[in-house]
Amino acid sequence: MPHRSKSRSAILAFSAFMAPAVAIGGMAAPAVAADYPSKPVTLVIPYRAGGSMETMGRVFTKALGKELGTRVVLKTRPGAGGAVGALEVSKQKPDGYTLLFAASVSLLWHPMTRDIGFGLDSFTYIAKVTDSQMALIARQDAPFNTLKELIAHAKKKRLNYADQGPMPRAFVNFIGSKEGVSWTSIPTKGGGEMVPFLLGGKVDFAWSGGIHNRFPKKMKVLLSFNSGRLIASPDIPSMQELYGVSMPSPVVIVGPKGMDPALVAKIEAAIKTAAADKAFEDLVTKKLKFPAAFVGHKALTAQIQQVIAGMKRVVAATKK
Amino acid sequence: MIEQLIAGFGNALTVTNLLFIAAGITLGIVIGVIPGLGSVTALAVLIPITFYMSPLAAIAFLVGVNKGGTSGGAIPAILLNSPGTPEAAATALDGHPMAKRGEAQRALKFALFSSVTGDTISDVLLIVLVVPFAAIALQFGPLEYTAVLLFAFALLSGISGDSPIKGLIAIAVGVFLSTVGLDPVDGSQRMVFNEVELFDGFPLFSLAVGSLAMASVLGQLFELWRAKGEKRLSVEEYSRIETRLPAREFFGHWKTIGRSALIGSGVGMLPGLGVTLAAFLSYGAARRASKEPQSFGRGNPQGIIATEAANSAVVGANLVPAIALGIPGNIAAALLIGAFIIHGIVPGPFMLTNHGELIYALFASMLMANGVHLVIGRIGIPLWARIAQTPRAIILPPVLVMCIVGVYLPNQSIFGVGVMLAFACLGLAFQRLGFPIVCMVIGFLLGGMLENSLRQSLRLHQSDLTAFLGSPIALVFLALTLFVLLRALRRA
């Protein structure tokens, strides 16, 4: 995968093609990039303090500040699965002084399913720093070892699974509708509630946002919901391979729509170096067990479009 | 295990470590005193500082912050009747009447001593139970949680105010308010009027600080205004007031202390239930066990003991699911887990095997922190008690400002401040009408959990209510619920 833009003009041409607003914004403010940054940058994290996303953002803030040569102020703005912080950033000026560090899920699911105040085109995707590790999991002693066996099992007996919100549920039910089985979703609030339910035998299988990496001896992975395979389970197929759709896994840094391409390139370069920062890389790969997977503006924007197309299929297929 | 613990003390007992614990406790208490800023905010604010410390120092520091933050909340509750958190509201029920009689120092001592004792008991339980615990916690599924929550509501209705019916109505209002926001199952909007800020429902801190602390402070200001100044105790009346609290008198309440610590530890070990439930369950239990239940709410020190011992006991026990299963028991434990991860310790079933040395050093630090907490808290009491002697007209207005700051800071949301002001008005109205506002706040807090557990149960068992019969744990709690409710109604 190309992870670096070849030239500035390539970006310009690309963004003009993707979203006219970007190009107009770019032409209106050509001088912005030269003296950027001339004041502190605010990095909004739309999640509660303490989770792995916030932990990651906090360490990243320091690395980015070093790279940009200015103070980067971290601001947590939790609510509605990230939508509150995203809405706030979408309303700021596209001058690069307000950026958002978020899982792309938070930017895509809400606007697809309801009127939330921002749309799929409200953001300039600057870079991806890693991928969340989303999987379909079961207890180690479950009577099925693969997705196929799970489906065969579900045809004999109605199974329960723990979801963690409407989007994971839509994706699990999408598999069900493709395979001609139905199962009962049990809503759980985050991984903290899912783990005891799964290990205590209250549910048969579960969707996991990555917490299963902490329990390698107690849980097994049946499917990767990412577009590629998971780093910890390279033998397990991904949903993209089997069904041609995937959940949005990129953890991204975005700004409001209409950012000047030169500015985007400047911030992208800073993020690229910051993502390779030792403290950050150590936290992401060794402690959280996420991949280090920097992807720049151009490739990321294309990747997000592909994910959106897949999500639209899932939404259409699982609508009642 | 004893050997490991001794080795743990060997690692943890250093001057630097003690200093970090002391600093953590002091900062925790100071932050906890501000209404709305409890241990959660204190932890969130202070975690970045720990990036530069060694893992053990960092975690000892944060454990200190957590302990100090939890007990600091009792201070404004007792002195000013302005509890910043729902659990401190239970402390205020008896603590403030005691302070009003002039026994502020004794009330603060009761609070501190029970806090430290409850904490120590729960730390010991943590160390002993952390391994066998995992199996027990897994028995608790949606059915069991539903039954425990119903039982909590039944106990709660009898706690404050004189009419259990009014208590139940207030709880129902709270449960109703908790349904505002996105539906937890299908994500449809419920009473949010397309306001994104309301998608997660009313922010808990705004609701709690507004209806508990701010309403109470406003009520007191109105009272002052109507009475044209306040009647103050004369100097010789002050000199006659007892400020001492001999250890013998305190430990004379050993039954309440032990019961409360066990309730707190039990609740703390179950993920998600939290400090507030522990405080109120324990308060209710103390009141029911007492020979003179009507003395509760009028300055009975057992009320303070019950709440403080229980809510501090949650702090240690909360780490049991965090360490045994990798699941935080509440937000404070979640923040601690975040800090663990930053320092390279991945919580979960393998934490003890992979980082055993560090974990036992952590246990040792927790026990040491209790001693430090006692000393620092004790030094602070005469200072805090001055506040009780300062005219309320001087003390109360700044508390209003602190309420606003405390609610604004964590999420930097003006919307949250607006919600707080609205609930301050609602709180005043409840006061005037004789409805216990605390019941409303806890109904709100537990309402979301009740909905979640009940709906999970219904989905798991295809809406078959007889499923409750299949769970002995749930049956016991449902029977207790009926018993408590019927008894309360017959008395009333």
Image (cartoon, coloured by chain):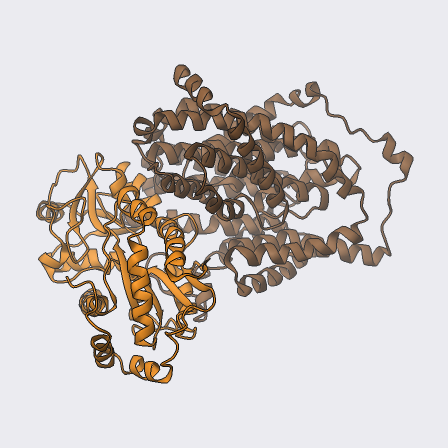
Quadrant in which residue B468 is drawn: top left
Any idea which chain is the brown one in this picture?
A: B
Give how far across and how far down residue B160 sits, in percent.
63, 43
Viewer-proximal residue among B250 and A17: A17
Q: Please, is residue A118 above or below residue A40 in the view? A: below
The quarter of the image holding the N terminus of chain A is: bottom left
Residue B421 shows in the view? yes
Report the label total: 0
Which color has been applied to chain A in this rendered view? orange
Q: Which residue sits at x=54%, y=45%?
A: B42
Residue A188 shows in the view? no
Give how far across and how far down residue B43 sits, in percent.
50, 44
Q: Please, is residue A57 above or below residue A87 in the view? A: above
Viewer-proximal residue among B1 and A313: B1
Quadrant in which residue B238 is drawn: top right
Q: Which residue sits at x=71%, y=55%?
A: B398
